[in-house]
Amino acid sequence: MSPFDGLSIIDRMVKAVEMVRERLLRSTAALERAGVPYCVIGGNAVAAWVASVDPSATRNTQDVDLLLRRSDLDQARMALEAVGFRQQHVRGITMFLDGAENRVRDAVHIIFAGETVRPDDPAPAPGVEEFERFETFRAVPLEKLVAMKLVANRRKDQVHLTDMLELGLIDNTWPARFHPVLAARLQDLIDHPEENLFA
């Protein structure tokens, strides 16, 4: 039975957001209890940083992305399986499925600290030693989050970066902080913000 059965469209929308938040809090709480170092990354990390400036500007995200050390994966697996997740590898990505339907969309996706996601990425993922605490969970520091978004460089990553620029979380001094390839990507967003205004 789907958790959306019998719900109105509006209630389904609310439920979808609540389920992502519950998945985020359940997975991070399990890692905290087990003493496994981690950082929240991706859309939830962006939302936390954006909400620190303007909660009304946050965007919903459909999955949970976590940064872990590969050496901690076994310990993380035990902690996450204890709260209902199941490890799976899909298209080369390590993830933990959640719920009876076992959909990839309803998963915690893992990125490994110090490793590149794609062979041609201009920079590896950061470590988990540095973090910013947002109430109950640890998120990647802002500069490292921006770097990850610049490395991924998908449309949604560009939109997230544009949001940060518009809110003043980052500004035109930031390109100098990054590898030249990443600096050029950020500078392009700074120079052409109109391309992301209606995203």
Image (tube, helix red, strand yellow):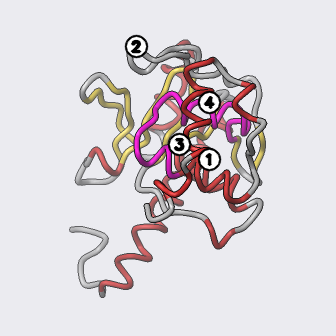
Which is the main secondary structure of the residues drawn in magenta? helix
Residue placed farthest to the front in the image? 191
Q: Mark 1 points at which residue?
A: 45
Circles 4, 1 touching at the beta carbon (< 8 Å): no
Circles 2, 3 touching at the beta carbon (< 8 Å): no
Kind of residue at badge 2: Asp
Q: Which residue is drawn at 74% across and 35% down?
A: 174
Q: Distance between the residues labelled 2 and 4?
A: 15 Å
Q: Distance between the residues labelled 3 and 1?
A: 6 Å
Q: Give the quadrant of the C terminus.
A: bottom left
Position in image of residue 67 (x %, y %): 56, 30
Q: Name the residue under label 3.
A: 42
Asked if residue 79 is positioned above or below residue 25 in the image, the reply reads above
Q: Mark 4 points at which residue?
A: 147
Q: Residue at x 75, y 50 (%)?
A: 169
Q: Give the range drawn in magenta.
A: 139-159
Of the residues under marks 2 and 3, which one precedes in the sequence? 3
Q: Give the quadrant of the N terminus.
A: bottom left
Q: Residue at x 62, y 36 (%)?
A: 187
> Could you tell me which secondary element the residue under label 1 belongs to?
helix
Kind of residue at badge 3: Gly
Kind of residue at badge 4: Ala
Of the residues under marks 2 and 1, which one precedes in the sequence? 1
Of the residues under marks 4 and 3, which one precedes in the sequence? 3
Q: Distance between the residues labelled 4 and 1?
A: 13 Å
Q: Mark 2 points at which residue?
A: 120
Give left or right: position of 176 versus 72: right
Asked if residue 13 is positioned above or below residue 59 in the image, the reply reads below
Q: How crowded is mark 3: few (under 14 residues within 10 Å), some or many (20 or more)?
A: many
